[in-house]
Image (cartoon, rainbow, N blue to C red):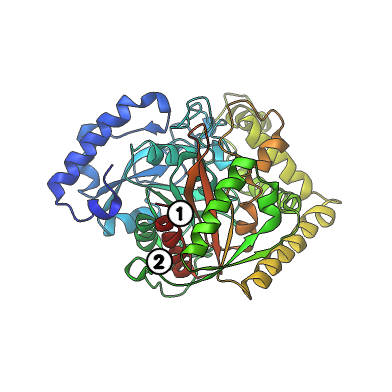
Amino acid sequence: MITLKQALSLPKEEIVQIKKDLKRKIEEQKQLGAYVEQLIDSEISELGDGVPIAIKDNIQVDGWNITCSSKILQNYVAPYNATVIEKMLQNGLSAYGRCNMDEFAMGSSTESSYYGKTLNPFDPNRVPGGSSGGSAAAVGAKIAIAALGSDTGGSIRQPAAFCGCVGMKPTYGKISRYGLSAFSSSLDQIGPITQNVTDSAILYDILAGHDEKDSTSLNIAHDKVSNNLNPDKKLTIAVIQNYLEEASPEIRSKMLEAIKALEESGHKIVYKNMINSKYDVATYYIVATAEASANLSRYDGVRYGRRAEVNNLKDMYIKSRSEGFGDEVKRRILLGSFVLSSGYYDAYYIKAQKARHLIKDQFEAIFKEADLIFTPVTPTTAFEFGSKKDPLEMYLSDIYTIAVNLAGLPAISLPIGKDDQNLPIGGQLIAKILDEQTLFDGALSLERALK
């Protein structure tokens, strides 16, 4: 598959041919379920001559059906472009194909989609991760040059690790959220899923920047990182010892190999510990579900989305939401409503916000001694479909990624090897707020060291 960097230098006629070739390859791998909708030939030219980028089904593209892979949003047509789509169009890219996802980005396996599951391109019996599983599977299967995903607690990085590609979550506020269907507003960030670190930096530069339409957008100038990549910069990298010990033997083995490669490249390795990741999980699911319950209250059958056929207003609310939302979304709405309810708000939500501050403080303490933090992305490789019977067990697949979102930090997942079943393993680098340059420099250094 041609890389994004290579594609950006091609003439328009060749880009049109690439789109047609992609259409054929997507059709040949339809059983993968990475895409829920792709463009027909007559639509290819309508989106311009830009390099085709796959889009997660929760990012608005004018004129497209954008459904968040939910029954409740079937037949909804986006009336405008998200800011990231406008930036793509202005920089020689175009949206191409709508990718599957966990319903309303709530999940870690892309099993909760209304359209059915997406398969892992390395093993059809295993999940591709989630919630951006379709985007990651498309890139991993070489049926997308690159893709956009959204990351609330690891929803870009975890599927990228499972599907053998690079997934990047930026500093909170660096990429506009305008046009992203909100799950948890203080955690969500759009980010790139690509074939390599250089492509990730290029796509990040295209997407980043202040947006007046987004009240959470950082009002600062964006300095491009892709023009200044320096894999030879010597860094101090903190390895989180207790995360390493908690990971599976396969993950730990490849992490140790990557640590050795970093040392041989001249980087200084220091070892640190962080609080038990179970506290990250508890904090995340209280904050995220509380915000989700508020954000999803707009889907009531009145303004837009699916409306149930009933005889009175009360039944319309109840039936539209009961029939339109899947089990996982209902579960999170109920939990979020509970932690925000009278008598429980202080005991749960306020306490979670205090814990969130402690998580941020521990990152800041480590960054006083290190330029980057290196951790596993996931505790195991991609798991089999249906193997996580308990929702709480599923939530634990994000234990190494959710703290990054709680602290608003930038992070990147990149392949560091495979296990004996040929399943990809990812490593995660985390940087200080707004230090994406160091993040990409370190990631490119690791990528080259492991080749």
Residue 154: percent from left, percent from top: 57, 49
Left or right? Give the position of 119 relative to 89: right
Q: Are marks 2 and 1 in contact (CB under 8 Å)?
A: no
Quarter-of-image position of residue 433: bottom right
Left or right? Give the position of 437 relative to 374: left
Query: Which image quarter is the N terminus in?
Result: top left
| Vertical placement of residue 55 versus 185, above or below | above
Residue 332: percent from left, percent from top: 68, 40
Of discs 2 and 1, which sits in the foreground? 2
Task: Give the residue displayed 76% in from the left and 61% down from the top.
Answer: 355
Tell which of 132 and 164 is nearer to you. 164
The residues bearing labels 2 and 1 have C-alpha atoms spaced at a distance of 21 Å
Q: For the residue labelled by badge 2, is the local secondary structure a helix, a strand or a loop? A: loop
Amino acid tagged 2:
Pro
Q: For the residue labelled by badge 1, is the local secondary structure a helix, a strand or a loop? A: strand
- Whether residue 334 appears in this view of the structure is yes
Residue 302: percent from left, percent from top: 56, 38
Task: Give the residue displayed 41% in from the left and 63% down from the top.
Answer: 208
Residue 206: percent from left, percent from top: 35, 61
- Disc sitting over residue 191 in the figure: 1
Amino acid tagged 1:
Gly
First along the sequence among labels 2 and 1: 1
Left or right? Give the position of 283 relative to 310: right
- Whether residue 290 appears in this view of the structure is no
| Vertical placement of residue 323 versus 289, above or below | above
- Disc sitting over residue 95 in the figure: none
Tell which of 282 and 277 is nearer to you. 277
Question: Circle 2 is placed at which residue position?
Answer: 231
| Vertical placement of residue 129 versus 438, above or below | above
